[in-house]
Image: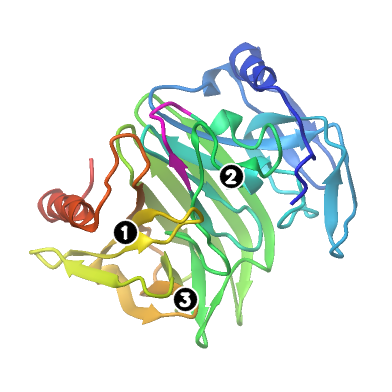
Amino acid sequence: MKATKFIIPLCCLTLTLSCKKEVDKEKTTSETVIETSKEDKIKGTSYAEISIAQGGKWIDGSRNHKEYSNGTSFKNVSELTVPKEHTDHSWYIRYEGPGWESNKVGYRLYLDWRNAIDIFGKTTDEIILPKVGQDNFDSYHEMNDWGMDILKAGKSMGIGSIGRYLDGKVLHFENVDQTNAKIENTNSSSSVNIDYKGWKTGNDKINLHSKLTITPNHRYTKHDVTPSKAIEGIATGIVKFDNIELTKKTSENKKWAYISTYGEQTLVPDKLGMALFYKTDEVAQAVEGTDDHLLVFKPTTNTISYYFLGAWEKEKDGITNKEDFTNYINSLLEQLNKNNQLN
């Protein structure tokens, strides 16, 4: 990683969030951004954002791809059409994609071909995303006063993201015509909306809409996924680690189930619990992939809805053992059994 790409005082971002008077639009041949407006400021105890570099330019990088070089600062935007030049480690999007958080936990999505979801473990109940990656681009890989990036996603989908399981492999988002991300913050929730246009896998090309929503005081994210075409193999899952047991449970009414893991599965390392709750009638099969515990959905053009969460032992008033984690996710499964949703 390039640890000195950007050195940006947090006060600049705070000024941008609080004092921006109106929405400006900036266009180049490869990107469209809509700057964050006054109404998009941080609200309540959930928050979502996407932040891009400015003041630099695209150059040929060291790995035969483009890099955004000599950026002077970051700016938060409410909407972004991802530049064609952008890929992993191109130094353009702060912490490489959109982020969302509650007062319990934070998440980020790699907005490139990997399309994995990572976890920001928080040691505080304050909003932390506006300062993540501001001092050095990838400083979040080390412990900070707010916490750190705790999950090693590797070649997996991380937790709760989308890929396609085809011929025994998980296909990510290597071939997409256009990706657009939009941020929503309200008093009751925060969301990241992503539209993938022309996602090609195998012999199929589809559009896919993804909405990731988090609410105050909860760890879980609700993920709503809507494909434009009914194809086999659309999948989600949890990253798989050696010597970490996968646990499964189905609700009493058989309409909901979860898969979960618990143990030393962080970069620290220390204890982390992860769980994914899904509707049983939406899933065709559960599969053990090379890098993921997978849930493969039935072909549909209807919206698929599921929940995922991470619970880190170092979070404020956190869950510190497997028994408590199991009791916690069982209580959520009971809510789904009773209400068909998590509130």
Q: Spatial distance from mark 2 to mark 3, Cα to Cα?
A: 40 Å
Q: Residue furthest front?
A: 269
Q: Secondary structure at mark 3?
A: loop
The residue that disc 3 covers is 231
Mark 2 or 1 closer to N-term?
2
The residue that disc 1 covers is 275
Q: Secondary structure at mark 1?
A: strand
Q: Spatial distance from mark 2 to mark 1, Cα to Cα?
A: 24 Å
The residue that disc 2 covers is 142
- The foreground one among 48 and 61 is 61
Pair 3/1: label in front: 1
Please indicate whether residue 109 sits to the left or right of residue 317 in the image. Answer: right
* Residue 135 position by quadrant: top right
Q: Secondary structure at mark 2?
A: loop
Give, as a single range, the part of the protein colored magenta: 120-127
Pair 2/3: label in front: 2
* Residue 215 position by quadrant: top left
Name the spot of residue 153 as percent of width and height, x first: 53, 62
Mark 2 or 3 closer to N-term?
2
